[in-house]
Image (tube, grey):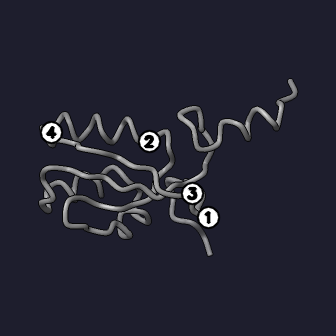
Amino acid sequence: METDDRSERADIGTPRDYSESVYRFYLEVADCSPTTRRLIEDFLPQHYAVRIVGMDYGFEFEMPIQCAPDLVRQLMSKNIAVYQLVRLAKTKGQWAKQAPTL
């Protein structure tokens, strides 16, 4: 079965983006404690978790767009209020559960 490249490109950056593309996100939460940070670290593969940036009211990190609902659901299940999750920009990274080989 042949795929239409145009339809795949049209989905990039939308909720239908199931590509391996990685985006920078800003997550604003009520609780910026080390416990919340650990939950985010545990959600992300280690090579992305080490690059989380703590902010005054949240965190910046990278992940694919399709992971956003799962992360919010996980935080909410731990009673951590999420005020916003903003997709900032597409990065050059590709999602992989394993660390990239150099």
The residue indicated by pointer 4 is 78
Q: Residue at x 49, y 39 (%)?
A: 66
- Percent across and percent down for residue 102 are 62, 76
Residue located at (29% from left, 60% from top): 59
Q: 89 or 3: which is nearer to us?
A: 89
Specify which label sits upstream in the sequence, 2 or 4. Answer: 2
Q: Which mark is residue 26?
A: none
Residue topped by disc 1: 92
Residue 56 in the figure: left or right of residue 46? left
The residue drawn where x is 59% and y is 38% is 17
Task: Return the disc, 4 or 3, that comes first in the chain's sequence.
Answer: 4
Q: Nearer the viewer, mark 4 or mark 1?
A: 1
Amino acid beneath label 1? Lys
Measured in 3D between alpha carbons, the distance from the residue under mark 4 to the one under mark 3, in whole angstroms, is 28 Å
Mark 4 vs mark 3, foreground winner is: 3
Q: Earlier in the sequence, mark 2 or mark 3?
A: 2
Whether the residues at callouts 3 and 1 have beta carbons within 8 Å, the answer is no
Residue of label 2: 67
Which part of the image, by quadrant, shows the N terminus?
Answer: top right
Badge 2: few (under 14), some or many (20 or more) residues near its Cα, within 10 Å? some
Tell me the amino acid under the disc marked 2: Cys
Q: Separation of disc 4 and disc 1 at Cα? A: 31 Å
| Residue indicated by mark 3 | 90
Residue 96 image-quadrant placement: bottom right
Label 4 neighbourhood size at 10 Å, few (<14), some (14-19), many (20+)? Answer: few
Q: In this view, does 16 lie to the left or right of 66?
A: right
In terms of sequence position, does the residue under pointer 1 or pointer 2 come before the other?
2
Q: Distance between the residues labelled 2 and 4?
A: 17 Å
Q: Which of marks 2 and 3 is in front?
A: 3
Tag 2 and tag 4, C-beta contact below 8 Å:
no
Q: How far apart are marks 1 and 2 (CA)?
A: 17 Å
Q: Secondary structure under badge 4?
A: loop
